[in-house]
Image (tube, helix red, strand yellow):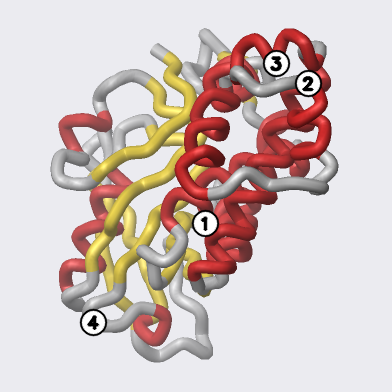
């Protein structure tokens, strides 16, 4: 497992370098990272890979250089009339999602048993994350499948006073499982809080929620005991 974790980190590091190189010269990147252009070129082509703490430091510096928040917000459009965002450019950019999925996997691999995602636009991102983390993906839906007999059930209390059901096949989550919820957006947090409560029913737990964008701060009232790991904020 340790070798696989290091491999995922190395792939993520190389992809970060490639993205940085599209926007900056080697000299610019060199001045920000404190590495020579020649060394950076060797890293990007996989001839040499820095190890341990050095790679972690370089990854952190590159994330700052690239500015994921800007990259994400450049791919979405906010509709002021409806209050919703058009995120189709973001969720259809599989190459970019693949890079972010490597980031999430590098952070949580070895600490998670199952990836969960509500049945919505976050599924492509969640699929990539689960693949790199080498674990199963469970989709939470608002309806039951005929062939599935046992579910973990939950409810979402909507802002207009309504109630929406949620269903997760029982066979996909076991007692003691550590879960990562992966989604594209959090607004109120109601869905994600419901999933946290669903897992608690079977003595499993959500270790963190990883999303691309959080909108506003209302979600903080719903999600208080779980880390929300996000890359971009929209007021």
Earlier sequence position, callout 2 versus callout 1 = 2
Disc 4 or 2, which lies upstream in sequence?
Answer: 2
Q: Residue at x 72, y 31 (%)?
A: 17
- Which residue is found at the position 50% from the left and 79% from the top? 145
Measured Cα–Cα span from mark 3 to mark 4? 46 Å
Distance from Cα at disc 2 to Cα at disc 1: 44 Å
- How many angstroms separate mark 4 from mark 2 (CA)? 50 Å
Q: Earlier in the sequence, mark 3 or mark 1?
A: 3
Q: Nearer the viewer, mark 4 or mark 1?
A: 4
The one nearer the camera, 224 or 103, is 103
Quarter of the image that includes the C terminus: top left
Of the two numbered discs 3 and 4 on the same chain, state the one appearing first in sequence.
Answer: 3
Residue identifier under label 2: 37
3 vs 4, front mark: 3
- Which residue is under mark 3? 29
Residue position marked by numbered label 1 in the rendering: 119
Mark 1, secondary structure of its residue? loop
Q: Is disc 4 in contact with disc 1, using a CB cutoff of under 8 Å?
A: no
- Mark 3 vs mark 1, foreground winner is 3
**Quick one: label 4 or label 1, which is nearer the N terminus?**
1
The residue indicated by pointer 4 is 175
Residue 85 visible? The answer is no
Foreground disc of the pair 4, 2:
2
| CB under 8 Å between discs 2 and 3 | yes
Is label 3 in contact with label 4 (beta carbons under 8 Å)? Answer: no
Compared to residue 122, the image places residue 174 above or below, namely below
- Gap between marks 3 and 1, in whole Å? 39 Å
């Amino acid at each position: 497992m340790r070798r696989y974790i290091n491999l995922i980190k190395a792939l993520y590091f190389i992809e970060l370098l490639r993205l940085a190189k599209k926007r900056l010269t080697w000299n610019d990147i060199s001045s920000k990272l404190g590495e020579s252009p020649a060394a950076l070129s060797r890293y990007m082509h996989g001839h040499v890979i820095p190890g341990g703490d050095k790679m972690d430091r370089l990854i952190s510096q590159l994330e700052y250089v690239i500015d994921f928040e800007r990259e994400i917000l450049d791919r979405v459009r906010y509709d002021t009339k409806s209050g919703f965002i058009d995120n189709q450019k973001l969720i259809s950019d599989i190459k970019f999602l693949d890079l972010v999925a490597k980031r999430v996997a590098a952070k949580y691999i070895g600490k998670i048993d199952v990836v969960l995602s509500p049945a919505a636009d976050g599924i492509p991102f969640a699929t990539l994350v689960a693949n790199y983390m080498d674990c199963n993906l469970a989709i939470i839906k608002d309806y039951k499948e005929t062939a599935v007999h046992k579910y973990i059930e939950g409810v979402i209390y909507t802002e207009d006073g309504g109630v929406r059901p949620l269903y997760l096949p029982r066979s996909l989550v076991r007692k003691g499982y550590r879960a990562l919820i992966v989604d594209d957006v959090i607004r109120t947090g109601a869905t994600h809080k419901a999933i946290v409560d669903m897992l608690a029913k079977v003595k499993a737990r959500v270790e963190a929620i990883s999303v691309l964008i959080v909108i506003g701060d209302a979600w903080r009232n719903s999600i208080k005991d779980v880390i929300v790991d996000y890359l971009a904020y929209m007021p």
